[in-house]
Amino acid sequence: MSGTAVAPDWWLGLACGTGGLIGGYLGARLQPRLPERALRSLLGTLAAALGALYAALALS
């Protein structure tokens, strides 16, 4: 070990945790109201967009 301390990024952790809580709550509330086809399309589009974003960042 090199002896250097590594501290967590608390603001990023809080932001991700808050987003997860809000997203989980909203997802649970909206899921019964959305048709399955719309939900699958929405999640597929989101996954494809995130994949394209990561690919663009990796290539730049």
Image: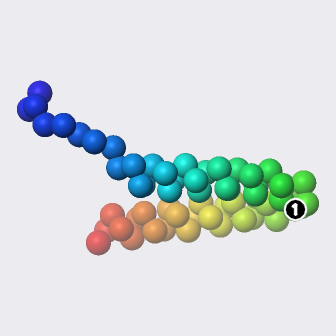
Q: Residue at x 55, y 49 (%)?
A: 17
10 Å neighbourhood of mark 1: few (<14), some, or many (≥20)? few
Residue 29 located left or right of residue 22: right
Residue 17 located left or right of residue 59: right
Give the residue number, with chain letter if any, for mark 1.
34
Quadrant for the N terminus in the image: top left
What x and y, as percent, mark residue 5?
18, 37
Residue 37 showing in the rendered view: no
Q: Is residue 32 above or below residue 3?
A: below
Color style of the picture: rainbow
Q: Residue at x 29, y 72 (%)?
A: 60
- Looking at the image, the residue that sits furthest to the left is 2
Give, as a three-letter code, the residue at label 1: Leu
What x and y, as percent, mark residue 46?
62, 64
Residue 16 located left or right of residue 37: left
Residue 55 showing in the rendered view: yes
Q: Is residue 46 above or below residue 28?
A: below
Total labels drawn: 1
Q: Residue at x 80, y 50 (%)?
A: 28
Q: Residue at x 82, y 65 (%)?
A: 38
What x and y, as percent, mark residue 43?
69, 60
Q: Kindly state the secondary structure of the residue where label 1 is placed.
A: loop
In this view of the protein, which residue sits in the foreground, 16 or 32?
Answer: 16
- Looking at the image, the residue that sits furthest to the top is 1
